[in-house]
Amino acid sequence: MTAPADILAALNDTTLDLDGVGQLLDDADHSTRLEVLAGFTPRLQKRLFEAAAGRRVTTEDIVPDGTGSLTEVIHEGRNTLPAFRSFQKRFCLPSDPHTPAERRVLWGYNHAPLKGMTGPGYFVAYDDDDAGEVVIDYRELPPEKPQEWPPILDNRARLGRFVYAGMIDRLRRVSSHVTIGRAYKDKPMNAYFALVRTPDS
């Protein structure tokens, strides 16, 4: 199995082979992928997002088919903020009564150190088929949640109005378990993050 340092070296190579890196990450175990994630710098995340353009990802990569409704799937995250860089995005499929007929959606929120001040940052995620990306939309709130998740709060409340209100994220594929994202508020922001899906979460 390839060591985390070697995968990071491949990611930082001047001629980035994203297909090759994706295969290395697919072949790695979860703990190795988390070690790689911990080494993601802001510069690398920006480069990775640009390199991942056109690498198709769907909501089925985020919450696999066969997952029970309202069953939590955790993605460990690393962002480009100066502090509090580690967080989680937690996703689930809706219950049958709340499942739309016209699109596959996920409910989710941000499990982060500052959620007491910013709110949990609830969102609805869905596929952008034209771009081949997953959109995480903070302008929509889910109508339900798993029992153990915090109360659903409008993203304009608390300090969330400065963080989540009016924002969407776009995800692109790095590997089967790893995605890279960028935040947008009307236009692209200089804010990136990487996610690693936890198996059997």
Image (cartoon, rainbow, N blue to C red):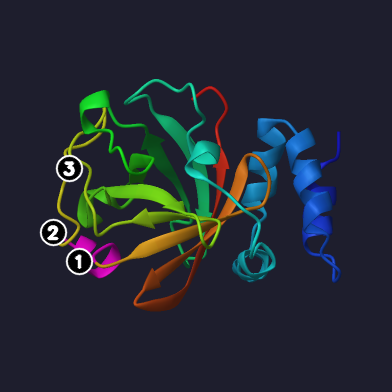
Residue 188 location, x and y as percent? 45, 76
User: Is 178 left, or right, of 149 in this rendering?
Assistant: right
Residue in the image at 70% along x and 47% along y: 36
Q: How many C-alpha atoms fall within 10 Å of the one at disc 1: few (<14), some, or many (≥20)?
A: some
Q: Vertical placement of 2 versus 96: above or below?
A: below
Residue in the image at 53% along x and 62% along y: 131
Q: Tell me the amino acid under the disc marked 3.
A: Ile
Do the CB atoms of the residues marked 1 and 2 lie less than 8 Å apart? yes
Q: Which of 128 and 46 lies nearest the eye of the viewer?
A: 128
Q: Which of 92 and 118 lies nearest the eye of the viewer?
A: 92
Check residue 13 for magenta coloring. no
Q: Tell me the amino acid under the disc marked 2.
A: Ala
Q: How many C-alpha atoms fall within 10 Å of the one at disc 3: few (<14), some, or many (≥20)?
A: some
User: Is 129 left, or right, of 12 in this rendering?
Assistant: left
Q: Outermost residue, bottom direction? A: 187
Point out the stretch of residues depicted in magenta: 158-165
The CA distance from mark 3 to mark 2 is: 11 Å
Do the CB atoms of the residues marked 3 and 2 lie less than 8 Å apart? no
From the image, which quarter does the N terminus lie in?
Answer: top right
Say which residue label 2 marks. Answer: 157
User: Is 134 left, or right, of 143 in this rendering?
Assistant: right
Say which residue label 3 marks. Answer: 152
Residue in the image at 57% along x and 49% along y: 57
Do the CB atoms of the residues marked 3 and 1 lie less than 8 Å apart? no
Residue in the image at 36% along x and 63% along y: 168
Check residue 161 for magenta coloring. yes
